């Protein structure tokens, strides 16, 4: 690392020209100038007023004070108002190099609090300008390969999900002889909420909306709650075989079947609890909730802009096809469970590959700023 300097973060920067920030609620869907804010998406809206534009001569870095998202911007733009920091590296520092190093910084996670107070305490390693450009070139090439690999994997995940979806839609579209139509309310029993006054000394595992994985539709994590610390939504008693479906943001498809290890626990009122009657298979209800027919209905009924939701009644009034014979139902459920299992295994394999690629990116960045990439090639 010959001739590399270690410089305090704020001493790496020149002053950014003053310009206005536009509140998110005022963003336009189209306009003369792009708005760059702290969200993951690169362009977040548009604006028409020339006076608010930040003129960019040397590329700048837009950084999310809340999100820690890093964007390298080489065009004139308007700043989004919430949590946006704009950094202009000094002339001796390549902007792309600075952006890559900023992505490599590991800051303590503060949730939606501001992170700049932590970032400004960091120190950056700065090699000579030509070496910075060489590192950027290596990183650009490696990361382009990684992003292409990730795009291919994400397509494979989507294909696996679409195959499963098409089979579901085909099954639940059947009608006529051997089938009957009923609402979910017809085939489910009533459930009840917990009365915390009766459970002063007991703890329960609690399933919140985020507890159900959207990829595998399994409960991946729970928290322990009691009368003293339970969130206001922690009310619905669940039993083995119950099917729960998230009525908040319903199109995210958070649905799962409660297993024996969660029997007698509780879930959020953000879920509707569907408890099948004795002659109805839990899997049959679960699979119906994943069909395009059901999801299209939920999308048409959801209300609210920030937190779209449907009611329990909206869910229970939905109509599904049910086989008249138990043999046919069991046969179809077995096939669907086998397909779901295969699909889940495939998706998990792909997700692990995505995780491995993210770790590779971190490893490459670490090597870059330890001086291990210069005059070397990186295989992505």
Image (cartoon, rainbow, N blue to C red):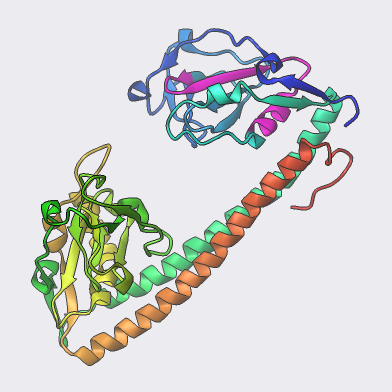
Position of residue 279 relative to residue 110, above or below, is: below
Residue farthest to the bottom, as pictured: 327
Position of residue 281 relative to residue 89, above or below, is: below
Residue 333, quarter of picture: bottom left
Q: Residue 307 placed where, x, y %?
A: 26, 41
Q: Is residue 99 magenta?
A: yes
Residue farthest to the front, as pictured: 201
The residue at the point 47 percent across, 29 percent down is: 66
Residue closer to the observer: 380 or 116: 116
Position of residue 3 relative to residue 233, above or below, is: above
Q: Is residue 307 magenta?
A: no
- Does residue 205 appear in this view? yes
Q: Residue 64 placed where, x, y %?
A: 51, 28
The residue at the point 27 percent across, 87 percent down is: 330
Position of residue 361 relative to residue 126, above or below, is: below
Q: Quadrant of the N terminus?
A: top right
Residue closer to the observer: 63 or 294: 63
Q: Residue 46 placed where, x, y %?
A: 43, 24
Residue 111, quarter of picture: top left
Residue 314, quarter of picture: bottom left
Q: Residue 192 placed where, x, y %?
A: 11, 61
The residue at the point 41 percent across, 74 percent down is: 340
- Total count of labels: 0
- Does residue 290 appear in this view? no
User: What residue range appears in magenta?
Assistant: 79-102
């Amino acid at each position: 690392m010959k001739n590399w300097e270690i410089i305090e973060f704020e001493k790496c920067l020149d002053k950014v020209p003053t310009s206005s920030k536009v509140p998110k609620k005022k963003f336009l869907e189209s306009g003369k100038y792009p708005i760059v804010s702290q969200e993951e998406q690169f362009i977040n809206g548009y604006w028409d007023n020339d006076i608010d534009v930040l003129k960019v001569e040397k590329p700048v870095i837009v950084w999310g004070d809340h999100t820690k998202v890093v964007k390298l911007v080489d065009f004139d733009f308007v700043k989004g108002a919430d949590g946006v920091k704009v950094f202009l590296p000094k002339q001796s520092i390549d902007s792309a190099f600075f952006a890559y190093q900023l992505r490599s910084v590991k800051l303590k996670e503060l949730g939606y609090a501001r992170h700049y107070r932590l970032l400004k305490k960091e120190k950056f390693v700065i090699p000579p300008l030509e070496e910075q450009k060489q590192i950027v070139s290596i990183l650009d090439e490696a990361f382009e390969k990684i992003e292409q690999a990730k795009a291919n994997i994400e397509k494979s995940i989507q294909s696996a999900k679409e195959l499963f979806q098409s089979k579901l839609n085909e099954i639940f579209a059947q009608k006529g002889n051997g089938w009957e139509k009923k609402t979910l309310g017809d085939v489910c029993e009533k459930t009840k909420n917990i009365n915390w006054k009766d459970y002063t000394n007991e703890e329960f595992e609690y399933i919140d909306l985020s507890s159900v994985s959207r990829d595998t539709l399994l409960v991946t994590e729970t928290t322990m709650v009691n009368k003293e610390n339970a969130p206001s939504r922690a009310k619905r008693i669940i039993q083995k075989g119950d099917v729960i479906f998230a009525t908040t943001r319903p199109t995210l498809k958070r649905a799962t079947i409660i297993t024996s290890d969660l029997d007698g626990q509780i879930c959020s009122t953000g879920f509707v609890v569907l408890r099948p009657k004795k002659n109805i298979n839990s899997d049959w209800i679960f699979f119906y909730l994943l069909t395009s027919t059901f999801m299209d209905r939920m999308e048409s009924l959801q209300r609210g802009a920030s937190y779209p939701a449907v009611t329990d009644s909206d869910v229970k009034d939905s109509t599904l096809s049910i086989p008249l014979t138990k043999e046919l139902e069991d046969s179809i459920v077995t096939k669907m469970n086998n397909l779901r299992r295969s699909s889940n295994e495939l998706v998990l394999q792909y997700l692990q590959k995505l995780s491995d690629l993210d770790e590779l990116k971190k490893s490459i960045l670490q090597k870059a700023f330890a001086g291990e990439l210069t005059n070397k090639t990186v295989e992505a």
